[in-house]
Amino acid sequence: MNIALPAGAYEVRQWLQGAAHIAVLTGAGISAESGVPTFREAQTGYWAQFRPEDMATEAGFRAHPRRVWDWYQHRRNLLAGVHPNAGHVALAQFQQQHPGRLTLITQNVDGLHQRAGSIGTLCLHGDIFADRWLDTPRNCCHIDHAVAGHPPYCDRCGNLVRPGVVWFGEPLPYATLEAAQQAARTCELMLVVGTAGAVYPAAGLAQVARQACARVAIINPAASDLDDVAHALLSGTAGSVLPALLAGV
Ligand code: APR
């Protein structure tokens, strides 16, 4: 094993080796080494530049649809130019080598886990590349027929296209959340990677796992709101820790 692994990693490797079912909860930090900004980091996070209520709520979109649409377009363009990093790849390879043993749950909407080859990723917060109507579509609204604009719209009823992400105040996709909670309840080990642990119900999955007697280990270069829930804190980046941690398990 790589001797650069942080303190506590040897123990977590033993838990990995003994676990028939592993759940992994990821957040924006796992994509940071691909060049994707996180949300809450001082200076560099999106929420250091923008207010979440302006850019990530239905009310913010209705108030300034062009501004919000253009920001998501900017993020889509950025994502088109980046690649999965060693952290995404290590998880995908583990899933391929151990079919059915690792359930991957992500708060990320960037598609990088899927591009790395991960299987059955549970995307709690949707998909930034998916378009959907803002209001319940009438017969006239077909997403393929949306008229180009900022945002695209229905030229018959005026319905607006919005990104298929979960905004603050909106419910998570029900079946996806159910599957994630089931994984949290039944796993023997949960790895929590690159999340501040500030947004629920996603962050609550670590507590669900802990209450169900799973081991919980956090991989993050900084402190997170979930540190008290964890049995082990591995201080390091996802791209450096995950490949060494998962190698040969
Ligand atoms: N490897 C691992 N963790 C990292 C790395 C890295 N290379 N770089 C940064 N981090 C950690 C930070 O220390 C921080 O704890 O990633 C975390 C990122 O936290 P947030 O920016 O709050 O992202 P996240 O927890 O995913 O946010 C949850 O909030 O705004 C919403 O919908 C958005 O899904 C998002 C949700």
Image: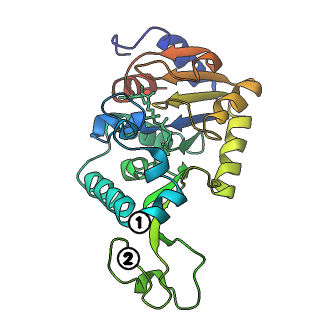
Residue 84 horizontal/vertical position (percent): 32, 44
Which of the four quarters of the rendered structure image does ligand 1 lie in? Answer: top left
Q: Amino acid at mark 1?
A: Pro
Marks 2 and 1 in Cβ contact (< 8 Å) = no
* Furthest-front residue in this view: 63
**Residue at the (65%, 55%) spot, across then down:** 171
The numbered disc on residue 152 is 2
- In the image, residue 237 above or below residue 103: above
Task: Check the image and report above or below for 55 versus 224.
Answer: below
Mark 2 lies on a secondary structure that is loop
**Where is the N terminus found, in terms of image quarters?**
top left
Which residue is nearer to you in this view: 217 or 139?
139
Using the rendered view, name the quadrant where residue 137 is placed: bottom right
Identify which amino acid the numbered label 2 is placed on: Pro
Name the disc covering residue 56, or none.
none
Taking depth in this image into account, of 98 and 175 the one nearest to the observer is: 175
Which residue is under mark 1? Answer: 65
Q: Residue 237, image x and y in percent?
A: 37, 24
Residue sitting farthest toward the left: 81
Q: Quadrant of residue 175?
A: bottom right
Q: Is the residue 30 above or below the residue 147 in the image?
A: above
Does any portion of residue 33 appear in the rendered image? yes
Give the CA separation, mark 2 to mark 1.
10 Å
x and y percent of residue 73 in the render?
A: 32, 61
